[in-house]
Image: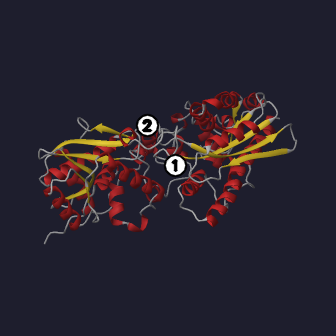
Amino acid sequence: MKNTPIRISKSDYVLGQKCPRALWLKKHRPDIVPEKNEVVLARGTAVGELACDYYPGGVRITALPWTADAVAQTRAAIESNAPAIYEATFATDTGEYCAVDILVNNGDGTWNIVEVKSTTHAKDYHYIDVSFQRYVLLHCGINVRDCFVMTLNSEYVRHGDLDIHGLFKLWSAAGELQDTDFVASQVARLHEFLAGDEPNVALSKSTRDRFYPCGYCHHCWANLPKYSVFNAFRNPTADKIYNKYGADLHNVPESEYADKSCGRLIRAYLDNADIVNRPELQQFCSRLQYPLYFVDYESIQPAVPMFDNSRPYQQICFQFSLKVLYEPDGLIEEFGYLHQESGTDPRPGLIKRLLDCCGDSGSVIVYNDTAERVWNEQMARDFPEYADGLLAINARMVDLLEPFERFALYKPCQNGSASIKRTLPAFVPDMTYEDMGICNGSMASAQFMDFMTGKQTPEQTHEMMLNLHEYCGQDTMAMIKLLDVVLTYCN
C-alpha cells in the first residue's frame, strides 16, 4: 500500500520554491517551527476580510481550509452560482490544496482568482502563490479565466469613510504566472523531497533572503560564527566566498577582501582591534551647534489608514522624547509627548508640542535620520500649517548614525552592524534595554496599536504608558551617551 503523500498548501508551495529544506523542516520538525508573528497574521486577516467588500454579496466558507467540509461548502456555493466565494477551498487527489481568498464568478461559467495581500505592491512570490492556486483549481475542474493579486493602494489617502475601491488595487497576473506543467513538475519535486530524509541544501544568503526572511536560520545557520562571510560580504559575493572557503573568515585569503569596503571590518575582526578615525570624528563633531536637541519618535504603522490625511502603512508618530543639552557638560532638560486619547490622530498634538520644545537654533540630533527626517516631511505635507516649523527642524538635523555607519568608530563585537542596538552595548556596556517593560520599537508600536484600537484594559494602558515613557527616554539618553563616546575619541 502506497504511503499517503504529505499535503501541500499554497504557502507550502511558495516556501518550497524558496528552499525545499525549509519546507521539509516545516513538515517534519514541528519542534523547531518558528513562532508565528501574531501582529502580521492579524493584520493580514483584517485586510483580507476588508477586501471582501470589494466583491459584496459573496458566500464565506466557514470550515477550516484543509478539511473536506470546506471543499463541500465550496462546491455548494459554486452550484448555487454565488457571485463570489470567500476562502473557496479545493483539493486534488494527490495532496495539493488551497483556499482562494476571493473567487469571483464571471457569470459565464468561468471564475477569477483574487489573491489578497496586505502589501502595497504585488511581488514575485505572490504570483507563484497564484500559479499554484490556478493549478489546483484546474485539476478540480474549475474553469479559471483570469488571476489577480489584490494589494493595498499606496497612493490612497483617507478622507472620511474608507473608500474600498480606492483603498485596494488589482494587479493582473497575466504574463506573470508559472506554466501549469512547470507547477506540476515542482509539485512532484517537493513531494519527492518530503518523502525522503532532510535534504542537504547548501547555505545561501540569496536563498535565505529570497521572497521573505527565512524562519529556519536558527536551525540551519546555528553553527556559523557570529561574524561570518555572510555578515561581511554582500550578495552575490557572500555565496561565492562561502562556496569556496566556508563560513569562517579566518579561512578567507586576504586577497578576497583587501580592496573591498568590508576589508577593514574583516581585519578588525581577525585582529580583534577597534577602528578609530579621529579626523572623521572631529569633522562630524565640528558640525554640532549648541544647544543640542536629542530627539526620538515612536510610531504606529496601520496597514489600513485610520485617520484623515494618512495612507496605507504610513508611519503615524504618537510619541517623542526630547533631551536638551544647552552647553558641554551642562545640565540636561527633558521634554516629551505621548498621545493619551485612544482612536484619535496623535499627530496634531505631537507636532504642536515638538515645535514648542525645539527652539529655533541648535543641532537636532537623531540616530538614523531616514526615519525622523521623512516623518517630519510627511507631517509637513499632511499638516501644511506646520510645514515651515517641521522643515526648519529638518534643516538643523544631524545624524549620529553617521560616524558609526561610516565605521569611523567601530568595535569587532558589533559584527558589522551600526544599529543603536549594537553600538550602544559595544561602547556603553552598562546601559541596557534588557528587563525593560518595552524593549524595542516593534513592541512599542504593537502595544500602542492595541491601545488605539481599544484592545487594552485601563490597567494595561497605565502600565504601557509608563513603559513607553521609560523606553523612548532610554533612546534619547543612549544618543547622549554615544555622542559622549564620539567626543571622547575626538581628543
For the residue marked with disc 1, what is the amino acid?
Answer: Asp
Q: Secondary structure beneath disc 1? A: loop
- Residue 171 is situated, as x and y percent measured from the top left of the image, at 31, 37
Left or right: 110, with 491 as reference point: left
Report the quarter where the C terminus lies: top right
Label 1 crowd (10 A; few <14 / some 14-19 / many >=20): some
Q: Earlier in the sequence, mark 1 or mark 2?
A: 2
Query: Is the residue under label 2 in contact with that under label 1 (CB below 8 Å)?
Result: no
For the residue marked with disc 2, what is the amino acid?
Answer: Ser
Observer-nearest of 142 and 27: 142
- Marker disc for residue 154: 2
Left or right: 274, with 309 as reference point: right
Can you say whether 39 is above or below 270 in the image? Answer: below
Q: CA distance from mark 1 to mark 2?
A: 42 Å
Q: How many marks?
A: 2
Say if residue 352 shows up in the picture: yes
Residue 485 placement: quadrant: top right
- Residue 421 is situated, as x and y percent measured from the top left of the image, at 64, 49
Say if residue 216 shows up in the picture: no
Q: Residue at x 75, y 55 (%)?
A: 430
Can you say whether 471 is above or below 311 in the image? Answer: below
- Residue 114 is situated, as x and y percent measured from the top left of the image, at 27, 46
- Marker disc for residue 237: none
Left or right: 304, with 101 as reference point: right
Residue under numbered circle 1: 248
Left or right: 338, with 14 as reference point: right
Residue 463 placement: quadrant: bottom right
Frontmost of labels 1 and 2 is: 2
